[in-house]
Image (cartoon, rainbow, N blue to C red):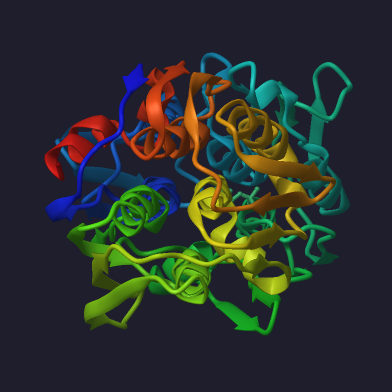
Amino acid sequence: MIIQKTGPLHGELTIPGDKSISHRAVMFGALAEGDTRITHFLTGADCLSTIACLKAMGISMEQNADEVIVHGKGLHGLSAPARTLDAGNSGTTIRLLSGILCGQDFDSMITGDASICKRPMKRIISPLLSMHADIRSKRGNNCAPLVIRGRALKGIRYQSPVSSAQVKSCVLLAGLYADSPVTVIEPVLSRNHTEIMLASLGADIQSEGTAVTIQPSPALKAQDIVVPGDISSAAYFIAAALLTPGSEILLRNVGTNPTRDGFLRVCSAMDASIERLNETTSGEPSCDLLVKSSPLKGTTVEGSIIPTLIDELPMIAVMACFAEGTTVIRDAKELRVKESDRIAVMTENLQKMGADITATEDGMIINGGKPLHGAVVESHFDHRVAMSLAIAGGLCEGELNIRGTECVNISFPGFFTDLASLH
Ligand code: S3P
């Protein structure tokens, strides 16, 4: 796709549903007793992979645009899949479902695309083995495909070496099937959508600091779920509006859970003008965001804020190129094991566009204020890389040719249409 410099952004948008919450809504709805009506579900490819896996285990659902009705069968209602489950490109699907599969009374195998088969699964295999699960990497390389034999699980107190909501959620979901409580302690708190949603379905789950404990559950009770807009998707338009002089946009109903809103806090530190309007606070908090173009300054992004903006770091790297001064991103080694190695891929692509950016082991150092120019860049089939580069393309001189933009469908099928609607 060829992207050219664009004028100011104006208008209003409703951002598609949150990806993390959409995955959890269909999974937990399947495990609950009764029907779950999900409103503003994200119909991106990742969440459709979750739906396909659940259907392969006997769960029926009706989908009409962004509304999904899940006919839950209870914690013990899944049936053995006839074939290997396919998580596609989705880390959330394979890691969360693995926790559930370990506690079933049937065997299964789960895999995904080429990117998924390179991502680390030892981080879930280790704690699950400590719970007495029978899970192994088929090729013995700690990656997918994962071969799982369902069996009775034991409780565990697990000190996770990484702050990862996928690892935490995997272990907590296995905990639904354990014989005693399961506690997960993280170095820094990661997104807590699993905790909020399981509690609303009646699970006995308590958080204290970075520790969360779940008691084995007799049952979950279905509840209707309204999914807020995905702040990770909103970030692209926020960045474009901030960086294009004369812009003013309103993004409606964006999720602002404090474990996810680090991007907004970094924008403030960069001197961005973003107002939060019509805030709601119960359950998953959300608000409308009024964004006005602002000259940005560099900042340091490090420490406990990192998990709250982990998926927004490719976009922050682009913003830093247009900000005055230096931006340092550190403590973000996790970026190396996402859908692509986002440190290497963003550094390489932005360097091709003339940016002064250096990769470090756990982040990037960006000296901003140097104009970017057109180039041929590669998404590496990473949706967040593709969308961040598309925003960079609207800001640079000359044509930006991005190879592999179809992958935006993973998390944001209408991305290019929505972007065009603001011009
Ligand atoms: C997610 C957690 C994060 C995030 C991913 C979605 C989730 O991954 O990067 O896009 O839905 O729990 P990690 O848990 O690996 O940090």
The answer to whether residue 380 is left or right of residue 147 is left
The x and y percentages for residue 244 are 30, 51
Query: Which sits in the foreground, 7 or 41?
Result: 7
Give the position of the C terminus as an image quadrant: top left
The image quarter in which residue 209 lies: bottom right
The x and y percentages for residue 139 are 84, 16
The answer to whether residue 295 is left or right of residue 363 is left
The answer to whether residue 390 is visible is yes
The x and y percentages for residue 235 are 39, 54
The answer to whether residue 335 is left or right of residue 21 is right
Query: Which sits in the foreground, 144 or 36?
Result: 144
Q: Which residue is depicted at the point 26% across and 54% down? A: 36
Give the position of the N terminus as an image quadrant: top left
191 up-or-down from 134: above or below? below
The answer to whether residue 284 is visible is no
The image quarter in which residue 359 lies: top right
Q: Which residue is depicted at the point 49% across and 64% down? A: 263
